[in-house]
Amino acid sequence: MELIDKLSILADAAKYDASCASSGAPTRSSRGKAGLGASSGMGICHSFTPDGRCVSLLKVLLTNFCLFDCQYCINRRSSSIPRARFTPEEVVRLTLSFYRRNTISGLFLSSGIIRSSDYTMEQLIQVARQLRETHQFRGYIHLKAIPEADPALIEEAGRYADRLSANIELPTLTSLKTLAPEKELGTIHSAMGQMRQRIDAANDDAQRDAKHLPRSANPKRLAPRYAPGGQSTQMIVGADATDDRTILQSAQHLYQRFRLKRVYYSAFSPIPESPSGLPPAAPPLLREHRLYQADFLIRGYGFQAEELLNRPGNLDLEVDPKLAWALDHREHFPVDLNRAEPAMIARVPGIGLRSVQRLIDLRRQRRIRYQDLIALRCRMASLRPFVTTQDYRPAEIQWESSRLRRQLTAPQPAQMALL
Amino acid sequence: MTATRSDARHVARATDFTEWRQRARQLLQAGIQPADITWQDGDALHDDLFATPAADSAALPPADRGARLTLSRDQLALLEQSARYRDDACHDRWSLLYRIVWRLARGDTAASHPADSDGSELHRRAHAVRREAHHMHAFLRFHREAPKGNVASGDEASGDETSRDIVLRDSEFLAWFEPAHDVLDLGAEHFADRLGSSRFLIATPRGGVAWNGHEFDYRMPCPVAWAEAARTAMTGDDDHALWRAYFVSTFNPARLNSRVMTQHMPQRFWRQLSEGDLIPTLEAGARHGGQRLAQVASVGQRDGKPISLRNNYVSHTLSAKGNK
Ligand code: SF4
């Protein structure tokens, strides 16, 4: 099979994994050195496919042969799709070629399970090792950690990769049992636990090195880094009946227990020969989007999953989770922007974290006026009913939330402003 | 450009930010009001029309009339970034900056805050510049130079410029890019970090830069031969066919969302991308029925087979060699 055919098959097979981030790596440069590649901590999207998704890494499977039979997955062994397999050298060649042409910032390599979990993990490591050691590649590498593999292999993977991820796919024991019979939540959790320990330990070492730089400035004597971009995971949304509250609580738990950098949500896309029991419908994109918004509020804005959804069920599709929370908690509003704590300002719909900082800076100099919010390009339509400034009080203070909600949603129907 | 305010007693000229900083410092120390200065852009095309001599220290009043100003590193970076902003309607990059430092020097600390009228324009420009630098890091594409013989015509075109020929012949990777603001050097620094000792050349409608693995060679304007070579290379690099195949396969037709795509990747860049012409085709295909499944049609049309768990089958089928 030609390389280009393998590429077509194995990129198609890999695209169901939503992660394509190249962020969080330490600063590296190849200037004046042999080899190739840099990383700056900030991710780069080199292209966008017409589905609006960022293309940052070469995202492929080493092979889409798989011994497992996860029902939601196009590569399950019972699926009659064309199969292909790259040699490690082929993946290396593609990575370097695309990198030099500036179409990617690195590689995200995953694989179906062939022969055994250990064998598969070894194959992934071999690609990363060739890139790092033979070609001195300093770009981004994200490897899939296969939870069932020997811990020593996951240990080795972390020495080459910027990021490791083990996918949880389905957040509950029951749904894993029905849809992914060969996978075990316990195994996935223990792999995540191992990775967290190693990442934490490496970060401690790195801090120690930073404190005593003069003696250990020789890079060979610096502590080896371990997956400096942290670990991430993915959950599939809409393949079974799990509700958003369960998904968000599970994500919150993963952030706390394993210090994940990111949880990705992937709306289940219909696949050929979908096994019965899986929805043949279009992927629930708006639901996925709301989950990302809620996740963002949990990571960055101090919200708890239980605050965003205080009863079983799904997030409101009509309004975003921050606005939904504000409509449910009118007793905290309006917020006086000249007095309120920064954390409370961050809870106002239409005010982002950067604007919070700018408002705090500004009110050290003078009183905040309504006009300032326009100048800071805050989302005026959303915030108007929820703030007071020196020269402004909302007219809607006495309104019922339901009336306010109608007004806020009436002019434009809920729009799909994707991230 | 030549219209001089009747009350303007000072004409100050700057080609770049460093030069502006020097001028501004002198003017500030001399206490010259923003309204009394006509700023001229050094690299405007009408240089010869400037009859009035540029401001120099000798022509300024004694320094003690004005103020000294110390800027934080962040403020300086903000000013520097916004000076890179280009806009047909924007001839006043220097006067905005001077008005802001003038106000800051007088203790008006809000002058550089994004909620201020000058400050918001400053931030808007700096933001547009940072975004454009990021666009360049993201959407510039390198092409490996076609085999030596093919570039010969480019060499002939500039036969009198031997040094340029050498740079051209040495460059392994060439790129043509059309940035909206002055970000060429920001891009070049970034790619020198990425490509290490590989030699590259970037040509733009304004300037050009070549990197020989050790140092930069900036040219303003960009030599014609560089631009030609960069544009020719766009058609001769076979590995972009692999990239195009990847782009098609990594797209999920069931998730079509063109609005978000164009928001992140403005159409003006598509021409420079080897995958650019695929976008409308993929969109149309997804709209007309292809949206049902996530799998790409060309992959779905191939023969497939489920995997049996019998051991001998697995080990045979799954070895890389057996897969050819
Ligand atoms: S292990 Fe499951 S999810 Fe992974 S490739 Fe195989 S079938 Fe798909």
Image (cartoon, rainbow, N blue to C red):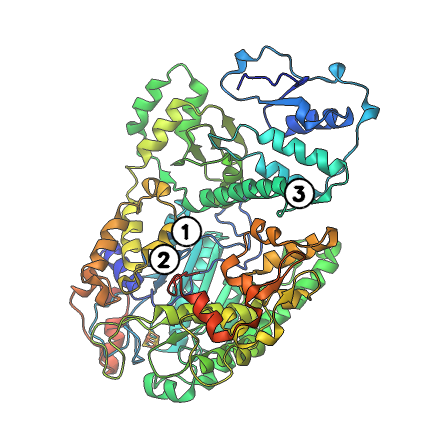
**Where does label 1 land, which residue?**
B264
- Closer mark to the observer between disc 3 and disc 2: 3
The reply to whether discs 2 and 1 touch (Cβ–Cβ < 8 Å) is yes
Q: Quadrant of the N terminus of chain A?
A: bottom left
Mark 2–mark 1 Cα distance, whole angstroms, equals 8 Å
Q: Residue furthest right?
A: B64
Q: Nearer the viewer, residue A328 or A200?
A: A328
In this rendering, is residue A415 above or below B228?
below
Where residue B302 sits, quadrant-wise, is bottom left
Task: Indicate the position of residue A215 as horizontal and vertical percent values.
Answer: 74, 56
**Where does label 2 land, which residue?**
A52
- Closer mark to the observer between disc 3 and disc 1: 3
Secondary structure under the numbered disc 3 in the rendered image = helix
The structure residue drawn at horizontal position 69% and vertical position 54%, both measured from the top left corner, is: A361
Q: Nearer the viewer, residue A259 or B96?
A: B96
Q: Amino acid at mark 3?
A: Ser
